[in-house]
Image (cartoon, rainbow, N blue to C red):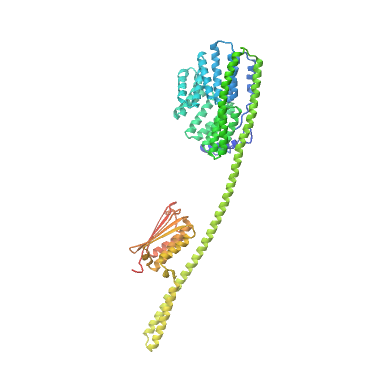
Amino acid sequence: MLKLSKHTFQNERRILLTISLLASFLITAQEVETDRVQETERITFSTIPNDRQKSLSPYYDALKNAQYGTQRFSVIDQLAAYHIDQANTDSILHYGNLYRKELELWDAPEDTKNMHFTKAYFILGVGNRYNGLLDNSIKWHISGITSGEEGNNSEGVYQNKIGLAKIYILKEELDKAVSELEEGLSAYEDELPSITNDALICLGDANFKLNEYSEAKSNYEKAFEGAKKFGDLAQELEVNLKLGRLAEAEGDYDQAFTLYNQTREKGLDSGITVFYFEGTIRVAHLFYREKNYEAATAALSVAYVNAIERENLNYQKEVLDIQRRTFAATGDYQNAYAVMTQLDGVTEQISAQQQQRINKELEVQYETLQKEKEITSLQEDQILKAAELDRQKTIKYAFLIGFLIILIPVMALLYLYYQKIQTQSELVKKQEEINQQKVTALIQEQELNLIKASIEGQDEERKRIAQELHDSIGGNLAGIKLQFASMEGDSKKLKSLTGQIDETYQLVRDISHTLIPKKFKENAFTELIQEYIKSISNTGELEVAFHPHPEREINAIEEKHQMEIYKIIQELMTNTLKHAEASKVDIHLSLINNELSLLFEDNGKGFETTNSSDGIGFENIKNRIQELSGILHIDSALERGTVVSIEIPIKTKES
């Protein structure tokens, strides 16, 4: 089997991931499996059902049957930990509040209750953080630290300090976060090594925010080694996400993609779906940074469904922010505005919930003071059933909203596809028009060449006949005249014959001169060139400028030189029209100290003089210049135009 390079492998994985994303629009709550051409690779984006897991049934049964007190609190703690791993915000807050309420009604010493309160407050702090209620989260973590210190629960204190530092990082209060973390590391590093990994991860986050990438990487790697040592898969996955984000910030997108996707897959396989969701969001953000907007939109749509399903407002806010930027980057401002409206709604919902929860907590505190310190199992069952019904209703609404959200990108893709077809059709029409114009131009050029060849042939034939008349017949008549002049006899008769021969000779000479083109006899040389240039410029394809100096002396050069120079200019102009793709030509013709200088310059595409062979046109030019004892120099380069310089020793008619 042919082995692929790392770069090719990464690109293929991204292509497969994109296909999987697009397929997820059409198959809700189904895993999409893509087979690699040379290596089997499963990359899926899917919604994760949020119904009660069969594996949790024993915990629910244990909760119903557990004795009130530490046994029941242990089950609640385990259920809350499970839902934290799944990022089920509503369930996290439910068990956190249940834990707190039952502790308030528990008849036990205050230090014993405080040891448990610090755990309940930690759960509530995490739930509020997931829901974007950062101020509430700070309040609960501070309460957890206070209760932990009073209940001598160092583990709870450390966990709440780390939770508090995470909130400070989210609020960009990095100095506070670093202070909390360094204080915790110095106090509990040896006592609680497993929790220290969380502190190192959080400290790495602060370093990352401060652009201290080397320090961040060092802390992340230490945390990863600790997680491997204690077999903590959740921490390993969290560190993988952090290292991926660091690689992305440093521009190593392939490494970032690998780490994000590994985290997603392991999180999904192991049931720790919070990392599946976060990994999906990070992959979507990476696609956005790489301008792969279709794949980013697909990943974000799936992530948004999962965030709604788990009522995780913080994830919803993050997804909508990336989606807004994605639509804006593609010029789809209508959808960008719609998403921004949704984002504002989520932000308002977070604020409203925060205020609502504050009010609710005040109400609960008031009701707690009025109630007797008792709770019945019947009331607990009713609360659980009501919560389950509310959760099921929320799931149904989430699926409906998710479907509508998915439908919008699908419609957008169809519209883009229609626009693409329309554009291709227009391009085909334009190409046909261009081809027709080229054919017409070629036909016109061919006709011009035929006319030129015909005229040149006529000129050559006239010249040949004139030379024959002048040289052959004229020479013969001159010889006959000489013979008559040497004969003796009737001088009057011979004189008459000699006169007739002179008359015939003159007639032949006149005919020979008549056959030679008259334009060089009857017109000034520079005017002939101007007339030719005008005929070229009238086509509108080429702007030609002619600069003779001094014009009077140039018009006085011999007719032979005029004809040859005129034909050289014609050949140069023909080459420019055929090959140079120029829009402008400058011709300078100067006569200084009996040396004629011709400078022909165009702004065309040029050519490499060392790699090109002479065509027929340049061969004709060189032959003519050689006959005139002239010098030719060509200066050209690709995309820089061409300059042809010719110098010919000359004599004027007046010299």
| Percent coordinates x, y for residue 75 in the rendering | 60, 17
**Residue 247 position (above or below residue 138):** below
- Extreme-bottom residue of the structure: 490
Q: Along the line of sight, which residue is nearer the eye, 4 or 256?
A: 256
**Residue 192 position (above or below residue 301):** above
| Percent coordinates x, y for residue 105 in the rendering | 59, 13
Q: Quadrant of the C terminus?
A: bottom left
Q: Is residue 119 visible?
A: yes
Q: In which quarter of the image is residue 353?
A: top right
**Residue 6 position (above or below residue 441):** above
| Percent coordinates x, y for residue 218 in the rendering | 46, 27
Q: Which residue is drawn at 54% across and 60% down?
A: 443
| Percent coordinates x, y for residue 550 in the rendering | 36, 63
Q: Can residue 32 be seen in this view?
A: no
Q: Which residue is drawn at 46% across and 23% down?
A: 176
Q: Quadrant of the N terminus?
A: top right
Q: How many marks?
A: 0
Q: Along the line of sight, which residue is nearer the eye, 611 or 380?
A: 380
In the picture, measured across the screen, residue 70 lies left or right of residue 217, that is right
**Residue 14 position (above or below residue 226):** below
Q: Residue at x 51, y 64 (%)?
A: 450
